[in-house]
């Protein structure tokens, strides 16, 4: 899949930045810690088509969360529960 990237944050605090200028396709993120008070975050502040959670389509895909936005971009959070996502997991 063109533009697809794997990202593994490992332990500790992780910030995943999604920029319209260099991100076409899909990202897969392993080891994202979701929920209120967690330190991992998805940063959409440089993406003109993702200005709030209302601009994101978030769905549970088996044991993963698929976040779709823009014309054809997505982020797959491996091993994450969509019910545990919190507003502080996102930066706009």
Image: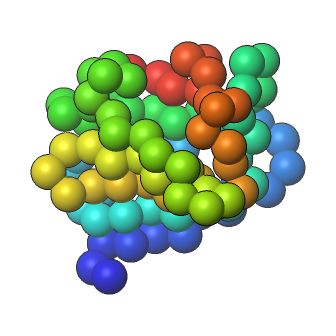
Outermost residue to the left: 71
The answer to whether one can see residue 15 in this image is no
Question: Can you give x and y, in whole percent of width and height, for residue 22 in the image?
Answer: 27, 56
Instruction: Judge from the rendering whether residue 28 lies leftward or rightward of residue 38; answer left or right.
Output: left
The residue depicted at 69 percent of the width and 31 percent of the height is: 84
Residue found 47% across the figure and 23% down from its top: 91
For this view, does 10 lie left or right of residue 88? right
Which corner quadrant of the image does residue 19 belong to?
top left
The relative height of residue 30 versus residue 41 in the rendered view (above or below) is below
x, y (%) of residue 53? 38, 24
> What is the total number of numbered labels drawn onto the structure image?
0
Q: Is residue 26 left or right of residue 40?
A: left
Q: Position of residue 42 (x, y in %)?
A: 52, 36
Q: Residue at x 61, y 61 (%)?
A: 62
Residue 41: give x, y in percent of width and height. 60, 32
Q: Residue at x 54, y 50 (%)?
A: 60
Task: Check the image and report above or below for 30 versus 11.
Answer: below
Quarter containing the C terminus: top left
Residue nearest the observer in this picture, 90 or 65: 65
- Quadrant of the snapshot with the N terminus: bottom left
> Residue 9 appears in which quarter of the rendering?
bottom right
Asked whether the viewer can see residue 44, the reply is yes
Q: Point out the residue furthest to the bottom here.
A: 1
**88 or 23: nearer the viewer:** 88
């Amino acid at each position: 899949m063109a533009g697809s990237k794997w990202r593994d944050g490992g332990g500790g605090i992780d910030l995943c930045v999604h920029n319209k200028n260099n991100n076409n396709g899909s990202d897969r993120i392993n080891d994202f810690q979701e929920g209120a008070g967690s330190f991992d975050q998805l940063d959409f502040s440089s993406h003109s088509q993702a200005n709030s959670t209302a601009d994101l389509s978030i769905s549970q895909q088996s044991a993963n969360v698929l976040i779709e936005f823009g014309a054809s971009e997505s982020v797959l959070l491996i091993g994450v529960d969509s019910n545990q996502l919190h507003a502080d997991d996102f930066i706009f």
